[in-house]
Amino acid sequence: MEQWSESASAVNSTNERDAGARSRARILQTAASESPDSRAVLLSESPHYPRGPRRARRPLSFSKPCPGRFALSVSVPVVAANATSLLSPGAGLSGGGGERSATRGSEFLAGGRGPVGFTARGSRVSSEFDILGLHELINKFIFWFLMEASSCLCYQVHGFRLSKIWLWLFLALVLQNCNLALSASPYMVGMGSFDITGPAADVNMMGYANIEQIASGIHFRLKSRAFIVAEPNGKCVVFVNLDACMASQIVTIKVLERLKARYGDLYNENNVAISGIHTHAGPGGYLQYVVYIVTSLGFVRQSFNVIVDGIERSIVEAHNNLRPGKIFLNKGDLLDAGVNRSPSAYLNNPAEERSKYQYNVDKEMSIIKFVDDELGPVGSFNWFATHGTSMSRTNSLISGDNKGAAARFMEDWAEQNGFPKQSTHANSDNLRSLHKTSGLPRRVSNIIPEPNEINDDLIQLASSYEASGGRRLAGSSITRRIRSTQQNKPKFVSAFCQSNCGDVSPNVLGTFCIDTHHPCDFNHSTCNGKNELCYGRGPGYPNEFESTRIIGNRQFLKAVDLFNSASEEIQGKIDYRHTYLDFSQLEVNVSISAGSQQTVKTCPAAMGFAFAAGTTDGPGAFDFRQGDVKGNPFWKLVRNVLKTPGKEQVECHAPKPILLDTGEMKEPYDWAPAILPIQIIRIGQLVILCVPGEFTTMAGRRLRDAVKNVLTSGNSEFNKNIHVVLAGLTNTYSQYITTFEEYQIQRYEGASTLYGPHTLSAYIQEFQKLATALIANREVPTNFQPPDLLDRQIGLLPGVVFDSTPPGVKFGDVSSDVPGGNSTFNKGSTVNATFYSACPRNDLLTEGTFALVEKLDGSNSWVPVYDDDDWSLRFKWSRPARLSPRSFATLEWTVPEDAASGVYRLRHFGASKPMFGSIRHFTGTSRAFAVR
């Protein structure tokens, strides 16, 4: 206080002859009297301050943000005598970058003319205040600049130029506009994404529990996508959507540890949710409980690491992209992307309850649209229930299945429509519609010229380029060429999240016997008593890739429709509640006849016989079948070798016959989870229920309704316009949750409901408690923590010993080339080339590519146009024998209908491991060919 008064007096005394200085001194004295605490900003201009070099404008950056107060550090540009730089609060936000710190103070340089910080000595200082205080600060700036303008009128009398008056008036106008913009933005929003593809060889895929389904290539890459929403002066939430089968408890634990190391208590288990899309075509081995990693030969560290790294990187990117923005919500029905695969169990629900709904699966898609104040639309997340099983149990290419495909299509659509706004994006004249009636979707670099007619000269030119032969590379950075051209641009992030998909199949044509082609048995999904012959058919049958595209495209088109018409703005506070529960012995009050209540318990985890039968999306083997409430004597003997369930356990799970008593199996460590997280995230009128499993259609409906009733009963904060969505497979995984009535039928979903017939009632009871605490602004204590079993994990998958090629052959050489002889390919045809390669586990080429399609441009150079993240290009890897050190990579490109005519070639990247020494990267190309 004394310092500010002294500074004001100094200015007053040293500028007695300056008619404008007295006005400025009065402003300083007013600021000192109105701002007694250390956050006030001294506005000073004195001829005694050194007029240093012009200071560049700095963006806003976070400093000690939510929870608590969402604070900002604002760097204010120093306006030199000839300065034209402006304070620009909306210029950008940064949030820590790679620094592991919860606090990043911005700096003021007290030099030249303009606002300075706490000291009058020109040293670097940090000023911290919340964004609501920023409005007050800007108003003070405006007042100060107006006083400067008035003093300049005096200057004009003494011969100063009129231009200075207009400069100060212009600054005041800009600041007023910034103030209005800040007031109009209820949230800070940030989006991020990162590659989590994982090992594309040797690793068992997660989902079907088929030990023969081993990864051997890439259909398209997997991603982690994240959004962060923050109140300017309050709380924030993070939601991550993974192109993975499900979330993993150990992954969640380790991500939270990294976030704590980087940001302190900003992001934690309470406000971070990590969800999976339930693709069955991603590498497994990243969960910590034994039953989920048996087929992957235990824990696969490479799968685990790439997912943890990718989640962290996507959250960091979202944090760094936080900017003022708005969120809009919309919802609508999508009728042809899912059918009920256990209709006989659904029919066991009360008729009165079923009569409330038109369909036996949920058809509603809910979408939120993120709009940056400056850049426009920057992303969308939606929730819709359908399984990630368009790709079959025999597929071996890594794929995000239908939801991953839908996300690719929408991000491509956004880019080609100029979202987000950017000064350097491709000319719209060069962008064509992504989805033509007969075309294949793709992501394409904006360097591709307009299509041109192919002629004999181009065919002759193509024939002059033979395969390059393999050559060594210094590293893998060259594989990032397509992405590196876009790294400095804002990107649109679109996630297609999972909901209550437990009994919902994307194979919408129905279930048929593969031997007779007749429909399967309704109650047991068998064919002449054989479970393994009954399969669901997707809309592209018999082509699983086409089925994946169609179901993905249907979700994409609906999402675009809802995105474009979204008009309901989300408004209101951000909040969350989270707790851990022991589901192995949770007391539950359930209603019985005559309106009375009975206290029951959940059970330690166990899986029924029908679990081994699988589903019509991927049937099991042997003589298991769905709907089995008795069990098989032979398999009971086999079960007893592992663990014989006790009488209490058998009675608790009835009528489920126990095949695997996983909750009581502890060697070499826990086979199944007992401690589970439940979580509610609120963003205004949107409420997200984060559940650690697969709820069936009716189970999800009951949970949503129960929570909605709590939130709207006698609570003025919510009204009937509240939107409750269910995010399945979130934070960890505990298999299925059916209704009590569905459980009695013991189809696959009931047999996989781990904690007994009252599992759903337990979830409803505990979520009601969370919802009650949310509206009462009361914290929820937790007495449990899930185990961290990382150090106890066992992995039996052998590593890569070494790679080799035949004598005289180099890695990257072509084994089978594109046909020569002036060959040309039409749109829709497929081009193949096979290369001598090495195991993809040597380097995952994260954010890179194993495959490229290159196009010859007019200057005799090759430019990348498609990579292994494109729908049209597949990377297939194989060995000639199971333990052979030799391997091959086949690049298979289906020429898109809207590909530009011209000369192309295929390029392969890889990394080989010698017997001794370090990993060596290599590349090779096919001969060139023409595309008409």
Image: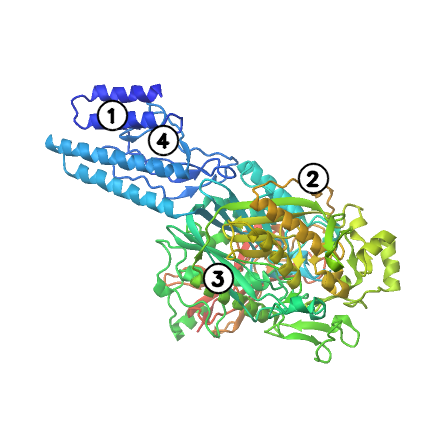
> Mark 2 or mark 3: which is in front?
2
Q: Earlier in the sequence, mark 2 or mark 1?
A: 1
Horizontal relation, residue 876 to residue 653: left or right: left
Helix, strand or loop at mark 1: helix
> Is 2 placed above or below 443 here?
above
Q: Which residue is mark 3?
A: 410
Disc 4 versus disc 1: distance between alpha carbons? 21 Å
Q: Residues within 10 Å of mark 4 (few under 14, many from 20)?
A: many
Q: Callout 1 environment at 10 Å: few (<14), some (14 to 19), or many (20+)?
A: many
> Disc 1 to disc 3, how far (Cα)?
57 Å
- Per the model, the C-alpha gap separating discs 2 and 1 is 59 Å
Q: Residue at x 26, y 20 (%)?
A: 9
Q: Is residue 845 visible?
A: no
Q: Quadrant of the N terminus?
A: top left
User: Pointers 4 and 1 in contact (CB under 8 A)?
Assistant: no
Residue linked to disc 4: 108
In the rendered structure, find residue 783 and report the number of the disc placed on it. 2
Mark 4 or mark 2, which has the lower sequence index? 4
State the count of labels. 4
Residues packed near mark 2 inside 10 Å, few (<14), some (14 to 19) or many (20 plus): few
> Which residue corresponds to mark 1?
25
Q: Nearer the viewer, residue 137 or 732?
A: 137
